[in-house]
Image (tube, rainbow, N blue to C red):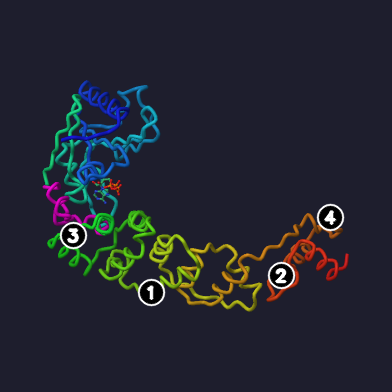
Amino acid sequence: MQINFDNKINEIIKILALEAERFGVKIYFIGGLVRDILMGKKPLDIDILVEGDAIQFVQFLGDFVQIKSLHKDFGTIKTQISGIDIDFASTRKEKYPISGCLPVVEKIGCKLEEDLIRRDFTINAIAVRILPTLEYQLIDLYNGCKDIKSGILRVLHKKSYIDDPTRILRGLDFQLRFNFNFCDEDKKIIKEYLKNPNREGLSKDRVVLTLKKLFSSNERALFALEEFYKKKYYKILYDEFYIDVNKFKSSIALFNVEDFGKVCLSYIVEIRKEQAPTLKNRFEIYKYFSNFSDVDLCVYYLKTEDNNAIIYFKELKNVQVYLKGSDLLGMGFTQGKIIGFILDKITEVKLAKNSTVISFEDEVNFVKNTFKL
Ligand code: ATP
């Protein structure tokens, strides 16, 4: 197999392979890197799988490597070598005592085959052995190459989605990114799983992390949302869930939100039904929404249809008071509650429709005309 890295990376990889031989471990490329190369894409990250203990191997490498962080329980270590980020992982065997929980590591430094079986799809379970001669040897135990060619997503064993239902969402991500499709067998298993998902031990953090990745691209966010709803993938998290994609589109336009993905993510993850509070006037609306980002406003509106969110966004959001407490003290007012009171009154008058108090000078005049020293 041929892999064309630039010279600097080739040099580093050659040294790593020689050192691995001296240390007595085999090293591999794996996962997304191999998949991307086989799909003719330029790999983004360099990940190296060590058939053994990656942390000990990196320590053996000494000054050649700068350690950035390590995760002892998972046997993973992030490094930088001559300015290039390289992540090392130990081969590991995992088990899932409860459906959807975080995996428990049974063994670090297991055989390559045992590591491959814990992976999500055949397309991500292709290993490439790195030899010191810079020759690359393809190890494709699960016909991942064939699945890449046919654009097929296939898990490695029947219990895979039950162990980790986030694989359904990872699959959707690959579907949208690469135009891949779940194989018929997987479609059936997913459908069955979604009929009766066991959420008792579900790691919500892991689901959220996977959703974050799924909704990280604006281009794909609305498609992802549509599929998430249509295919009932929301059942991974909830029994019932409703999404009106057209309403999403119009609200996103209404609040001028650039990051659709963030709206989708927040809408899905923050399931609580917002209750629109009773806000009596423009000042109360202003105060209530003042800490909302445009994404928050859009999500709030999608959940409540509260027109106050639109009033805030269109008419109040940019109202600003220029006078500071220190200015008021400079004008002769004394420290205390009165300062906050006056600032609130300035805000209130500026929020009124067709307010004539606009500039700093207008505010000063308003204070002079309204409050006695
Ligand atoms: P990309 O970074 O392009 O999205 P990737 O496959 O490299 O793709 P990562 O999330 O970085 O994505 O995962 C690296 C590898 O770890 C995967 O290729 C896969 O082999 C394995 N992996 C990641 N998440 C899971 C999971 N939930 N279950 C099983 N294996 C996983």
Within 10 Å of disc 3 (Cα), the crowding (few <14, some 14-19, many 20+) is many
List the residue tagged with mark 2: 350
Q: CA distance from mark 4 to mark 1?
A: 53 Å
Where is residue 341 drawn, in percent x and y? 75, 66
Q: CA distance from mark 3 to mark 1?
A: 27 Å
Residue 286 in the figure: left or right of residue 110 = right
Camera-nearest residue between 148 and 18? 148
Q: Name the image quarter holding residue 47.
A: top left
Q: Going from the N terminus, do you reach mark 4 or mark 3 first?
A: 3
List the residue tagged with mark 4: 330
Residue 314 - label? none
Q: In percent of the image, x 71 and y 71: which residue is there? A: 348
Q: CA distance from mark 4 to mark 3?
A: 69 Å
**Local secondary structure at mark 1:** helix
Residue 275 in the figure: left or right of residue 329 = left
The answer, for residue 99, to whether it is visible in the render is: no
Quarter of the picture containing the C terminus is bottom right
Where is residue 151 drawn, in percent x and y? 17, 55
Where is residue 44 drawn, in percent x and y? 32, 42
Residues at badges 2 and 3 in contact (C-beta under 8 Å)? no
